[in-house]
Amino acid sequence: MNHLDNHRSLDQHRKDLKRKLEELIGLKKDTESIMRSELQPRKKLKAEVQIWLENVERVNVEVHALDGRIGQVLSTTSLSGEAVKACIEDIWNCLMDDEVPKIGVWGMGGVGKTSIMKVINNQLLKETGKFDIVIWITVSKEMNVAKLQKDIASKIGVEFSGDEDETTRAGRLFETLSQKSRFVMILDDLWEKVSLERIGIPEPSNGTKLVLTTRSADVCRQMGCRMIKVKPLTEEEAWKLFLEKAGCDILNIPAVEPIARSVAKHLCRIQNFKTVSSVVHYIRKIGKLKNEVLFNFGSQKGFVEEMDSMRAGFDRGRAIMNRLISNCLLEVFADEEHARSVKMHDLLRDMALRTAKSRFLVKAGMMLEKAPDVKEWSMNLEKVSLIWNQWLYIPLEMSPPKCPRLTTLLLSHCNIASIPEGFLKHMHGLRIIDLSGNPIKNLPISLSKCPGLTTLLLCGCRIESIPESFFDDTNELKILDLSSNPIKSLPHSLSNLKNLTSLLLAYCEHLGNVPSLSNLGFLKKLDLRGTKIKEIPNGVLSRLCCLQDLIVGETLINGKEVGGLKKLQGTLEGRFYDWHNLNMYLEACRGREEPRQYIIYVGDVNFHTFSENEGKEIVARGCNIYNYQIVLPREIEGLVIGYCNVDCSEEYPLFSRFILFSLSSFSSLKSLYINDCGNMKKLFSPNCVPPNLQMLSVGSCKQLEEIITSVVETEERGMVITEFHLPQLRQLRLAFLPELKSICSAGGVLVCDSLVVFEIVYCPKLKRMGLNLPKLDNVPPSASASANFYLSVRIRPKEWWESVEWDGPQPKSLFDPYVRFW
């Protein structure tokens, strides 16, 4: 009874403490609100008020730390097996050892890493006084630094305001955690290396510990951890655990026992790959599909019915995939390229393959060195997948498999140099064949004798030529992918592919022509990036009226014909001869939606930038800009102009020459790069500064004098300060501008709330800096610049910085801590 009374008393005290803390935090917020409304600029708080605010924050942290110490007991499951007990003991010993600051607990998925650490977590809270606080953080597969920071903050009593950036949050976490002499932070389910500094976690030392759980030994090594592997159960332990959870009654059903034993065996095995690097490689590659690949494959297989619009098909495929995800049949993750991808759970995959065993032959990523024996190629087979067997070969003496029902054959990334002519002899029902990523130079003629073939994927092979008659009998072909092949020419029989919807020839660097392209009237996607094709002849595109994605890189296309493609609403990438051709395109597609994504080159080729824009962009090179207005797409996000002469017969800012199609504001423009534009003296007039610009880079414009020119005021009115607000501008780069005198004319100030990179290189006449960064006003002079605010000011040469005048409302000295000379 005394124990229960003590527990109730403790619980009541905790509730009372929380209530008092909430009242104190409320009073703190009211005080801060009054301060913001009444405190005058350049005035400081009274010392007693500042001390009171700091004490409130300290109390808040201490209360949350106390709550975390008492209230973070985690629910656990029963653990069994000698290996598990040994693992727990090893982890505990490392935690008690002051010489081990970081511990990496690793092992295959589902082996019990999280369950073991939950036991450790609860044991730390219960038994030892070695640590002040134990912080448990679950890291999602799609790791998000901001979310991780907020999760840590909630555990240690730090409150973030909505406008704090990543670096500021990291500084506050670092400061709070550094004040704790002894803590254990557990990062559960870490999938890749993380920067502790970026998050705000101090490097463990002097009694503090970092423990992480992960599936990858590489992550442990990269993080500098003492590695402890969680080993799978033995087969005996796995079977015992399975019966314990599922119940022995399951053995009364004869048909279920084989599946049950297979599942139990799965609990204790890992595939016998030859090296750890192979394991990592195959985990990343096998069984994982980017969303777009999945949608394409679904449409090829008939899972997604064919629709008029490829976009509608993708939307339908996405709906199906989301339904599978919501029912836990697929799981979502971000791959190494940060693309959203999906994966079927291993157990579910095994069950599906067992169910379809008589119709499917799947040996993906099993390090096969030889194609499965002909006995495994049964008459009933419908689908075969041998992908990612990197040492696979098909013996010449192998008897041709008799698989008349086979519709899908996946052999990509198997290092197959050749396919015996007879191998496909009895596979006349093939609809999909994927040979991508194999060093195949010649295609077997038997492949052209599959009359129902709809999809032929040959990306990344070594095919130099295709026989002239190859496509004579493949009239049903819809998708042909020959990307990244050294092919020099295509056969004229390509014109027989009347049903072709996707022709992918990207990065066929030796290909100079596509014969009879205009005959492919049902083509929806054409990709010619990186080929030697200089121009699509007039009259061709106008016959491809079903095109939805036109991706031809720097190949010249006719603006009027492209504008006439009414279904072109997916992706457009191509080159127009000049501004006039661009205007013809915009006029021809008046009244229709712009493509969802485009990059349009205007003028010369071979002009590349460091633009990070991946949406809607115009890149112009060598196009002279005269005294007429140039029309741009209404939702343009990126504009790159280089090596363009500007007619400066009048004082007229360059950007005033541009107008938007049907709109008057450049509200969508995010990035602007101007390089080597002769005769240009001014860039913006006051009324045409893009309000949502995030990146502005101007370089090598020899006559440029001002970035923004202001309206000249009369002497009677005197000097009027004009503020130009670019609240989203993050990067401002000015380089090699010998005549640049000011960013804004006299009386003008550029206000940038979000600037993080400010770069000035060799602008010797720039003497007036009308720049205002409001965030700098909120940085305490004593605070560490790296911990509380991120700004990089890069200057060359150093002598210029020492002589420049700072005309803005902030003193130049405020910027000094952030300046780097290079």
Image: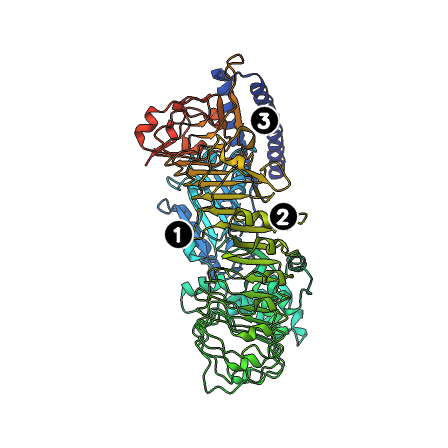
Q: x, y percentage for residue 620?
A: 48, 46
Front residue of 784/76: it is 784
Q: Nearer the viewer, mark 1 or mark 3?
A: 1
The x, y position of residue 688, in whole percent, is 55, 32
Rate crowding at label 2 as few (under 14), some (14 to 19) or many (20 or more) other CA atoms within 10 Å.
some
Vertical comparison of 801 with 215: above or below: above
Question: Mark 2 sits on what residue?
Answer: 587
Residue type beneath disc 1: Gln
**Alpha carbon separation for disc pair 2 and 1:** 55 Å
Q: Gap between marks 2 and 3, in whole Å?
A: 60 Å
Residue for badge 1: 222
> In the image, is residue 650 above or below residue 288?
above
Which image quarter is the N terminus in?
top right
Query: What element does badge 2 sit on?
Result: helix
Nearest to the observer: residue 759 or residue 251? 759
Q: Is residue 525 left or right of residue 792?
A: right
